[in-house]
Every structure is written in C-alpha cells, then in structure tokens.
Image (spheres, rainbow, N blue to C red):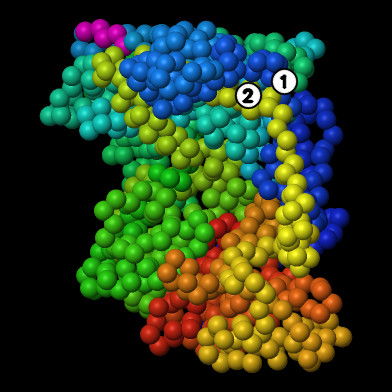
Amino acid sequence: MLQDFNETAGCPSIPQAEPEDTGHSSDFFIRVETHPDANVPDKIIPLNSMDAAQDNPQPKPNPSPTYAYHPWAPFRSLADFEFTEIAVRSNLPKQVVDSQLHLLHNSWTKHSEITLNNHSDMMAVLTSARDLSTSFQTGSVTRTYRGKPYTFNFCFRDPWKWVISLATDPTLADLICWYPVRKYLHNGTNVMRLFDEPQTAERWWDIQDDLKKSGEHPHCFLPILIWLDKGNITKKVKLHPIIARASFLPSYIRNASGNGGGILLGYVPSVSHAVGFQDTLTEAEKAEHRVFKQQVYHGVLGVVFESFYKLAQVGECVTCADQVTRVLFSGIPYAALDGEEAWTYACTRAASANFPCPSCLVPQEKLSSITESFPLRTTDSMRNVLQEARAAPTATEKSHILKRSGLHDVDNFFWSLPNSDPYKAISYDTLHKDDQGKFGKHLFPVVQNVLEQEGLMGKMNQNMNSVPRWSNLKHFSQVMHLEYVDGRDMFHISKCIIPCLVQLLPKNSSLLHCIRSYARIRMMVDLDCISEDDLSRLEGYIARYQHFCELVSQEYGKSFKFPKQHDTSHIVSEIRKKGATHNYSTRPGESFHQEARLAYERTDRRNVDPQITRADERQEVVARIRLEIDESSKLDSLPAASSSTERKSQSKGVEQLNQHRSNTGKHWTLKGDAHRRWVSCLDLQATVPTTPGFKDLDRRLRKFLHTFVSPDLASDDCIELRQYNCLALRYVSSVDWSSQSDLLRSNPSFNGMSRYDCALLNTDSKNLEFVRLQLLLTCRLPSGSLHDVALVSRLRASAKWKPKTVWDGCIVYQEQKTTEFILLDYLIRGAHFISFYDIQQPNAYCLNDLVDGDWFIRAGN
C-alpha cells in the first residue's frame, strides 16, 4: 500500500538502510586516520563485542595541581576557600559576608578555622588569585552615526590567553585533539566515512592543510566556536554575551561549565540604549540603524579577537601541557547563532531581503526549494560586492548593488581574520531552525488550526496525555493549549504527535506525511555520529519533505517560503564540513542567560558591564581552585567493609542475592524489590491480576525452568521467587557504539498509574520482535542457583488493520492476550509503543522510532 502511494504520488524514493553485521567479527571496527602532519599510524577501534562499548568514553586526565601541598592557595586555609566559594557562587552581598564572618569569629563558634576577617579581606585574596583564570581588560570602539561619534566601552577577555591556558593545562593534556582525523567504519562488506566531533569533518582538515609551516616544531590549529545571543535580563534590559568554546576539546568538556568549558569573553554594548533609538522609525531609518549596530558589533569583535588577528599568520611557539613544543594557531571556523544573530554576524540583510540567507545567494522566491543549490557567499565575493557598491556614482546605484547580494555597507571583521570565514562559520542550529522553526512556528500551528476547525482539540489533548511515559521524554496533558512552549518541548511533541494525530486527520493525509518527513530529518541530524550512508538517506528525506510541503501548501494554503525552511538545504554539507550538529548547537549557550540574569541582580543597575564581568571572573577563580582541590584529594575509593556483626546478621541467601544482582557480567539489573522477601508461586499468584495471561503461573514457570534452565527440576521442588518492579537494561548504541541503558518498569502503580514497558527481543527472525513486561522475577531453585525471568506478552506485526495514513516506516503491532516466560538474557533494550487511539482497535500499537537516535537507526530509517 505504501509503495503504491509513493508511485502514484510521484514522490522521491529513499535509499533503504542496509542491515549491518554487528556480530563478533574482527572485520567490524573503526579506523581513525590522523592528519599527515601528526605523523602517527592509523588507530583501530574494535566494535565486535559489548566490551568494546564504553559509557561516553572520557579519558581521565593526569593532573599536576598548581599547588602541590596547598591546592587552596592563595587562600590561607581550606576553610577560607570553602567560605569564599559559597559566597561567590551564591552571590552573597557585602553586608551578608561581613555579618557571617563577624558571627563566625564571635558567637557562632570559638575555634573557627576561617581566618578571613571581612568582605574586603576575602576580595583581596580573590584579587590575588586572578591569574588562575583569564582576566578581563577594558576596550572601546568609536563609530559615527549621523555625523556624531559614539564611544562604547566594554570589558573583555583575551581569547588567545584563554587558548594558551587550555593548551598548557595539565588536567586537559590527555583530552586535547591536536590534529584533525578521518574516521571510517568497516563492517565486513562496506567502508563508510563517519562524522562526529569537529576534528572528524572537512573544515578543520582543510585548515590544517593550509597552515604555513616552517621550522622543526609541529604546527597545530586549535579551532574555536563562538556563541552570541541577545537575551532579556529584565523587561527593559538586554545583555549580549559572547561565549567561546574550545572545539579541540571533547563535547562533554567544552559544552560543560567546568574546566575547559565555555568562557565568557564579554558583552556587546547596547547601541539602542546609548543612541536612544525610537520605536517609531521609518524603513530608511531602520536600515540606517541596522548598519550602525553592525558596525559597532564588528568593531567590538575586532577588539576582542585582536590577538587572534596578530598571531593568525605566524602562530606562537608554546610548550604544551604534554611537554611537546608546538606552534599554535587559532581561528573561528564555527559559530552557533540564531537567525537574527547570523544576519548581524554576516552583515547581511534580514528575512525580507531579496537574498536573505547569510550563507548563500538564494533568491527570496526560492526559499522553499530546499533540494536546489545556490552560489555560496565567500569572503572574496562579498568584499568585491562591497567595494563595487562604495565605488558607485550614486546612492541609489550603491543601494541596488548591495541589495542584489543582500549586504549592508559594513566591513565584516571576519574578512580579515584567517580561517574564520563568517559564511562558512554560520552553522545549522536545530533549536532555532527546527524545534522553534519549521515545526514549532510552522507545522504545529497548521495542526492546531486543522484540529480547531474540526473540534478535535480535546481529543488530541486526550491522546497525547495517554502516551506512555518514557525516560527523558516529556509528557504533555494539554498539548493544544500550552501557554509557553520552548524548543525542547517542541522536539518532544514532534516525537509523539504522529500516532496521536493519525486517526484525527483525513485518509492519506499530506500533513501527516509532511510531519513524518520532517521528523525523520530532525532525528537524523540529531545523531551524535553520522555516516556517509546516513547522509545519502538524509538527502532522500529532504526531497520527500519538500514534496509533502508542496502538497500541504496546495491543501492548506501554507507557505514554506521562509529562511528556516531554506536552511534545510545546507544540512548535509554542514555535517560534512563541521561534524554532527551537536557541535554547533546554541543549546549549551542558552542557559547562560540565566547566569547573566543572576549576576545582573547583584549589580546596582548602573554601568553593569564591569560588575558582571568581575562576578564571572570570580566564578572562574573559585572553579579553578575547586578543581585543584578535587584533583589533589586522596580519597579512599573503596567502600567501607561491613562490620563482622553486619556480616553475621546477613543470611547466606541475602548475600547470594546481592552478588547475583550486582553481577557486572550481565547486561541488566533488577531493581525495586516488590515484596522485599522470597515468596512462593502460590503467594505470587494471589497478588497478580486474574486475567487469562496470569493463570496457572506455577505450572507454566516450572515447565519453562525445566525446559530451558534445569532439566533435573522435579515437579514438587520448592521454587522461591523475588518480584521486581524495575529493570535497568544496558545495550550498545547503534549510533556511536557507546554503552547506553534503559530503565524499564513493570509496576501496577508507578506514580499512581500502572506502567508495563516493552522491550526488544533477541531472536533469529529478520524482523524486530517485541514483548511487554508483565512480571520481573528472580527464581531460586533447590540447587541454590538464581535465574532472572520475565512473564511477557508478545506484540506481533499485523496486516489486518491499517491506520488512516500509513506513514514511512509505519508497522501495526497487535498485543497478544497470551503470555509466556523468557530469560532476561534475551532482552536487548526497551521499546516505546504508542497506541493509535482508535476505538475499534484498542490493542493496535506502533513503535515510536523517534524516541531516540538508537531506535531511529534500529528501525531501519
């Protein structure tokens, strides 16, 4: 049926994912080829066993604390530092600090180890520790607006000093990636290029190729990503932070707030506040205003990154933390920006311009053509346009030339900074382009309008509220009436909306197909590791999405001519050039607005820039000292031994059970002991439902154990049972071969509701087979052996019934009324099933293959 629909609709076909042999074969591995400048052999990473998977492998650094004996220096004591740490992180006012120190030295305690006398004493020690972090300095930019010069003063950190501090930090020595690499997956039949971290993509490799190398020392390029975003601090106050992240450190380091994480470089001054622009501006005045703002913006960035500019050509010779002397270069090949910020960063005109894309020259009328390619902007071509415009004999001709390329008359600072092309740096951001863009502001409102017209808003709320809970999946009870929805909410809605919506829309709904096509794109670009084969399929998804967008336009009058729709055309090339999209997401930066808001609240609201940057500097200092203390602490990592009394009080059976549950050789762990004691089959029978699936448990369990576990088990042997409500199931991710886990429930009352999760079963079948967990048991046989089993009901694929619209990858599963026992050894991972919410088919379900990247790949997308 689906094939007939594709053919009659003339819809582009999608290359299907070929099943990969992930068995125990020596031909299944990743080969890592490092850039020739490194002069190192290829590295082989085997993927042929569960042991090869690691939980987000994070190499432990080999720390060499700055203060070997007193890591809290320059504080006089550990107590002094701990008090200061609390005061700084809590933003305690001067009066509170003085009061607490006074009480600590008087009525609160007689023998305080704190030597700090007052707030001034604490600030003096903090000031002496400024060198532990990159300090702020002052800068200024002067630009002329309507004949009047305006000077903007601001505080900033030198980004080059920060880069050097990372390169020479002993705690990061084993984590820094000095050279780009290329990764290839060998699966026994094919070899595929892989893209994950920035060093695995083409942009860094090309820059390393082009470095001017001389002398005996290795030359290394250390790329930086910057994030800028103007955010509301109060109803009237906005701050515009500049955050830098080290793309040469692993994502779990650079996207965190600890050592090696993002660093505040400063704030772009507010032009509107200084000049006093009015809201009632004409279009010409608005354009003049935008040009002036961009001039100040790029002037500020020019001051902040002046050190990069000076060293970009020759680099700096540095003895790094691993004691290797290198010539280091840096630049800004990556930028994480929302749409408005991207236009300012590129000095281009906004959404209504004739050529609104900051990366290419797509005409306004072609924004919906996401399978077409258009000339890319380059530094040379845009500089030539600006020169031509400035040489024009009239203002009208100048304006025409600039509009022809969607440019403003502004010198872009990044034109002069090597390896920092602004048009290449601007990146695809899933938060603003997808979650808050294509889906949140365009597709979801269409759904709301359609359901409102049909009077089905309440039914949709009911369906979404009935979606089974799942770890890390947000639940919505009133999805059609949410007052505030952020990007994360929209992403989670898109994961569950299709089965909830399918029976509420007409048959063969173009809108449902469009949402499914969008969701497949969104899931594919969210993968942390993506192959060339994945990218080929992604191109097919994009073509299919465009096809259904055209049908939705015809049926519902929805226009898809908007910049965020066009941005889809850049996804594939972005991943090839920069790696997976999480590398340049704006999500890690968005949380900084909350930190800035807290810092602002501690200021006097006047000349806030020096005050909030000093607060950030103090935060960095205490974080650095805390790292020194933690790294130098010699804590006993072994658990305390049980006392002899405790050991004697424990029965042999309890010890055996604890050893069984903590067995690391298994890929599962049972949790949530339901009865906290051993029970018989008869005791268990009295507590379970009386439905047919739970009848005659004793006889069926004995038969199962006799057949599959213990052939010597007699019919009258005593079997003791331990029932559990929770199962932690570990599995190897199909995305990046790391070890992941699911937390599954088999509980009649979990948070007031029954919850019986599903799981994927390991069988010889070529098709995926699933079960629902009805009971989780540990069986103790007369021999003393322990065996973990589950009572399950099967979910079988069925062709007897189809939903109104059969979307790509849709398979109907019917839950069987019968049950059977299985060993937990045969469970692979959890599976999220959602009902079709059809009154006539209450036992019809679909697999939610959008719940995470692993399921998206396993399901054959």
Q: Residue 280 in magenta? A: no
Residue 480 quadrant: bottom left
> On the rendered structure, is 272 left or right of 385?
left
Residue indicated by mark 2: 629
The amino acid beneath tag 1 is Ser
Residue named by callout 1: 64
Picture coordinates of residue 518 (x, y %)?
A: 45, 58
Residue 404 visible to the viewer: no
- Foreground residue, 49 or 415? 49
Please tell me which residue lies in front, 548 or 471: 471
| Residue at image coords 63%, 57% | 741
Query: Who is closer to the viewer here, 825 or 656?
Result: 656
In the picture, which quadrant includes the C terminus? bottom right
Q: Residue at x 77, y 58 (%)?
A: 648
Q: Nearer the viewer, residue 113 or 585?
A: 113
- For the residue carrying disc 2, how many other residues have a C-alpha within 10 Å: few (<14), some (14-19), or many (20+)? many
Q: Main secondary structure of the magenta part?
A: strand
Instruction: Report the mark closest to the observer, 1 or 2.
Output: 2
Q: Earlier in the sequence, mark 1 or mark 2?
A: 1
Up the image or down, 180 lies above or below 330; here it is below
Q: Quadrant of residue 791?
A: bottom right
Question: Judging from the image, what secondary structure is the residue with disc 1 in?
Answer: loop
Residue 767, quarter of the rendered image:
bottom right
User: Residue 529 appears at what percent x and percent y?
Assistant: 63, 48
Looking at the image, residue 786 lies above or below residue 14: below
Disc 1 versus disc 2: distance between alpha carbons? 11 Å
| Left or right position of 652 against 329 | right
Q: Amino acid at mark 2?
A: Ile
Magenta residues span 148-152
- Image location (x, y in percent) of residue 31: 79, 44
What label sits on residue 404 in the rendered view?
none
